[in-house]
Structures are given as C-alpha cells and as structure tokens.
Amino acid sequence: MKNRLLSKLFIVCLLSFLFASCSNDDNDNSSQKPPINTDELPKDETWVIFNGTETWAGGIYALGDNKSREINLASVPFYQLGYSAGGRVVDNVLYKKDGATSNDYGISKYSLSGGKFSPNGFVSTPNNTYETNFLVVNNTEGYYWDLSAGGLKVQKFNPSTMQRTGEIDFSSLSNGSQYEAAGQLILAKRDNKLFVDVQHGTKTSAWQVTPTVKKVEIAVYNLITNEIESVTEHAGATNLGLFADHVLWSIDEVTKDLYVVAVGDMRTQTPASRILRIKNGETKFDPTFELKISDYQYPSDFNRIFAYDSKIYTTISGRATSYYGGGQHGVTYRQDIWYWTEIDVNTKKAKRLSNMLPDNFYSYQNPFYHKGNIYFVTNNASENFSGVYQYNPKNGEVKETFRLKGSGRLMGFNILQN
C-alpha cells in the first residue's frame, strides 16, 4: 500500500514537472505581459491617438487630463478621417498625409483647441492617389513630391502658411525610362543636404515600380549651393521604401547616420530586403554595411525602421511570409507574426524585445524616441490588444504605455508637449 502511494506521488510530481517545463518552453518572452506601469501619467503632454476600423477610416483624438493606462475613446471628441494612418509631429505641430476624405490628396496640418483637433492648412496634390511624400523640417521649411508637378521635381513649401514656395529640379537625372521619380519615397535632410530617392523603371497598376536596372539610387542636393552634389548607387537592391505614408528611412539621433530600407520586389522577394547606410558626413552608401533580412528570416521583409544610438529597431516576422502569399491587400501578411526587434549595427546581432506582443502590421508607424524611451505601436488580434509599449534603451526595461479598450485598432500615436 505504501509503495503504491509513493508510486502515485512520484507520477504526480513527474507530471507536474513536465507540464511546468512545457509551459516554460512555450512561453516566448516577447509575448509576456510587461510589468504593470505604475508611472504617474505625464501632465505636461498630450497624447495624440489615431484609431481605425476595418475600412481604415477612423479619427484623431487628443488625450490631455483624460489620459489613462486603459483608454476608451467613446466619449472623447475627435476629428473624422476617411483614412486614418498616423501623423507626424514636428516642432510640436501635427501633420498628416491627405485630408478628411479618401479623395483629399495632399498634406494636412492640424491645430488643437478645446481638446479637439481641427484642420489648419492643406497642400493639395490632386493626382497623387496615396503617393504624396513629404518632409517637414521645421515651421518654415518643408518639401513634398507631387507627380502632377513633375516626377523628377521636389516641391518646396512653408509649413507655417502651408503654401508652395518653389521647386527643386532633378530632371537632369533622367535616363528616358517609362517612369521616373525623385523624392517619391525618401525625402531626408541632414547637414544642409537633401537626400532624395531616384527611380527609373516601369509603372503598372501595382504600387511598386519595376526598376530598369536592379539598383537603388539616392541623389544628394546641396541646399546651400542649390545644386545636385552627387548620386550614390547600391547594386543588387531595389525599391527604397513601401508607401509614402510609411517612410522607411531613419537618421540616428546620436550618430547622425542615415539608414534606408530597400524592400526589394514584394512579389518575388528578390533581391532580398536589406538595410543600407550613409554615414554621418558622407554622401555615398557605406560599402562596408548591409543588413539582409535573409540573415534573420526568409522569405520576409524589413517593413519598419527607427535608428537610435547604433541600434536599429524594426519588426522581423516569426515565420516565413510574403505580402502576396495569399489573400487580398496583404491579408495573410497582416497576422500576429511581427516581433519588435533590436539590431546592433556593429555586431549585426538581433534581439527580440521582451514583454511585447507581436504586431500584425495594420499600423505602419515607425517607433520614435521621447524623453528617454522609444515608443512602439502594436496591434495583436489574438490577444485583442491595441496599444503602445515604451522601451528604455539604457536599461532594457519595457512598460505598457496604454492600451485601447473597445476603440478599434491603434493606427498611430504621437506626443505633443503642453
């Protein structure tokens, strides 16, 4: 009897150990809940929230004194949008591609009054469909690309007045290709130089351009001498970016190095997606640097980028995937498979950021740095999560900034200083 009892106890203990082991093995650190955020809610800033529905429509909300760690937007006043991809904050002013309806192509500027956003200027690019690219440098300096004004021309505008002020002509870079554009996907300024992507190829109904030659090009325009200073090329890569409302370049705020994503052909996924660099003070692609997605996951793509202190923050899929791998408009691509990852640019080693749920790529927003933390937007359908994480790059601590409750997807998040 005693032996039988001991045997049963042994079996129970063994099973308990096995279940515990399996539980630990299946529990990916990147999907664990972060510690409860007990930080006091910031009183000196306004949270700007873009939410969205299945049709990509939504609104812009301003959360000031009504901020919380769990947010229901039902009673918060908002500005309605037909297409609710997130905006950009420059000098504490909110800008966004396009206007209130899906046919308002251009650049919108917003003002905040009484806890609600309203339009405060618009630059129209009527023939651009979803392709209007823009860069706001400060309150008086801005640039945008408008196909109707000339594919090889970059327009200048004054963000304070939202009026066009001139143009920069890159027509001398034409090689006679059926489709040519300068600045459609990359407009970046560093050291009084404008870095502009140049495309030569064929344009069909697809949103990507098929290049004449498999290479990427960036023209460097000197804003002091008002002339094209140089053109740098990188062979074996194509398509510098995805959509104009989802820029794929980043200037490291610490090192000032410029990083760009060459996503490649998303139908064939060749050449493989990669990240390239133009170092601080240079105007040529760095021949010693290249990050290929195939070194981390393949087939897949780099589809986000933010650089800070010699680290690149991006999402890497947990399994092989393709935008055209089934379904319409990347439906199978938009699953809970995109893990926020930190890549050391010196060692090229990648590390998943722990305590963050994987994202499903319905929000295109890149991470951003604010007061010691890097902020990441995540939507996860299986966990019914739409929210923001904050990551301290110095100590590696992750906290949940907030999550939406019954308020649709989180399409964008920005911060305004009060």
Image (spheres, rainbow, N blue to C red):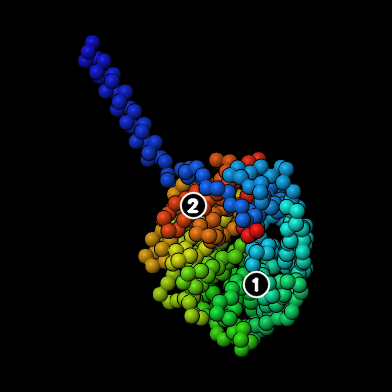
Along the line of sight, the residue nearer the viewer: 193 or 120: 120
Answer whether residue 402 is visible to the viewer in this image. Answer: yes
Answer whether residue 201 is visible to the viewer in this image. Answer: no
The residue to which callout 1 is attached is 138
Lower sequence index among marks 2 and 1: 1
Examine the rendered structure and indicate whether residue 384 appears above or below residue 172. above
Residue at image position (60%, 65%) is: 247
Mark 2 vs mark 1: in front: 1
What's the amino acid at mark 1? Asn
Residue at image position (62%, 56%) is: 45
Measure the alpha-carbon separation of dots 2 and 1. 33 Å
Circle 1: element type:
loop
Residue at image position (52%, 75%) is: 215
In the image: residue 282, left or right of residue 53: left
Residue at the far left: name it.
Answer: 3
Dot 2: few (<14), some (14–19), or many (≥20) neighbours within 10 Å? many
**Residue 414's quadrant in the figure?**
bottom right
Along the line of sight, the residue nearer the viewer: 91 or 168: 91
Circle 2: element type:
strand
The residue to which callout 2 is attached is 339
Mark 2 in CB contact with mark 1 (< 8 angstroms): no
**Image quadrant occupied by the C terminus:** bottom right
Please provide percent x and percent y for residue 143: 67, 74
Dot 1: few (<14), some (14–19), or many (≥20) neighbours within 10 Å? some
